[in-house]
Image (cartoon, grey):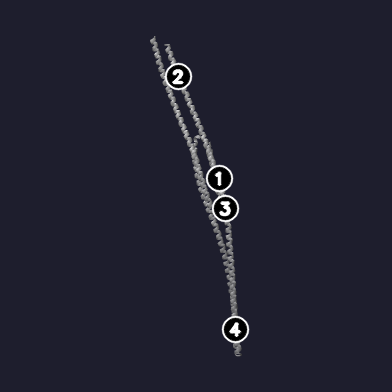
Amino acid sequence: MEAAREAQKEALEQNREKLGSAHGKETRAIRQERDYTVRNLQRDYNAYRDQATQEKQDMRLQSLQEKQKSSNNLLRAVTRERMAREESENELRGGFKDGLEVMRERYEQKMEKDRQAQDISQKHMKASAVDRVNNQIARLENDKEDLTNEKTREALRVRGEAKREINNAKRAFQENVEAYRRERDEAIRQGNQGRKEEIAKVRDDLEGQMVSTQRHYLQRMDEQNRIQRKAYDNLVVDHKTREAQTKVTADDRVKRVLEQTEGDKIRLIQLQNENHKTGQRLKQDEMKALRDAMADDKDQAVRTLHEEIQKREVQHSEKMNSLISKYERQVKSLNDELLRERKSNDENIRRLTEELQRAHKVQMDQLESKNRERLRQVNARHSEELRSVNKRHEERLDQTIGQMKKT
């Protein structure tokens, strides 16, 4: 009996050792599995936390870079706009006349399109989900780059149109000056032509009068000569008839007649010369009066034209100064509006970045809560498994002890 009891006791101890060893192995296996699972979860959690931290840092760095890039772009844009404004002012001072309203309307239309595009982009960004942030940022960058390129092209186009309009204005002003000069030359030419015609007409009239006067006196001289010749013939006949009567009387009478004829000829020649001199003096006086009148008219026309040109230049200068002042005010207003819009865009981007960061933080908190819940569930399941294993082990041990007691 003692040997049997010792054998049973030894068998019970061996069975207990086997059960204890099996329980220890199973417990170690469960513990190892739990440790492995916990390590994996901890490693995944650490990796996710590091990744999330890195992503947050990358987002913060990207946001700072975007802000810096936006600030630099704003500074460059302001610098370009300032340079463009200075160039436009210089070109305007050189002869810009019109086209400002068209440029302003085009610029306002372009700004309205940009504002609408920015509003659409902002609404689209606000309506997007967190998982599409990277795509949205890339698209916004592309849109911003496209808008920048479009603004650059538009600025170049506007500058080219402004230069063309300025050149057209200069050309129009030059054409107006040339037209005024041609009109002045034409007026002077017509005045000179009219006065030349009048002078020629007066000259022709004077020459006609001189010819008529000369013809008249020549006719009178011919008539006198004819009369004198006739009288001479009569005298000759009379002399021949009376030669016999008295030669002395005839000679005296012939001499007296010849002297009278010569005196008439001399008087006629003197009268003709005096008439010719009088006509020449009248002609010279009229020519001088005409030249003086032409010179006075020419001087008056030149003075009138100079006064008109000076008046137009003063009006043009006043108009250009008014346009330049108006353009400067509009450019200043547009620059202020652009700065306000840039500040508003920066504020919207900052607010959107903060919203995304808060959403990312909420997501991280939710994920961390999920990981803690999973870890709690794993620990609970492991504890439950340990309790179940211990319970089974105790039940098997009790069964073995019961069987041994029965035997």
Task: Decide which of 154, 268 is in the foreground and name it.
Answer: 154
Q: Earlier in the sequence, mark 1 or mark 2?
A: 1
Identified by mark 3, the residue type is: Asn
Task: Give residue 321's mark.
Answer: 3
> Which residue was labeled with disc 4?
259
Q: CA distance from mark 4 to mark 2?
A: 189 Å
- Where, quadrant-wise, is the C terminus in this rendering? top left
Q: Secondary structure at mark 2?
A: helix
Q: Earlier in the sequence, mark 4 or mark 2?
A: 4
Q: Position of residue 299 (x, y in %)?
A: 58, 64
Q: Earlier in the sequence, mark 4 or mark 1?
A: 4
> Which residue was labeled with disc 2?
390
Q: Residue at x 42, y 20 (%)?
A: 24
Q: Position of residue 222 (x, y in %)?
A: 59, 79
Q: Secondary structure at mark 3?
A: helix
Q: Earlier in the sequence, mark 1 or mark 3?
A: 3
Query: Which residue of the protein is positioned furthest toward the left in this rendering?
Result: 3
Q: Is residue 358 left or right of residue 403?
A: right
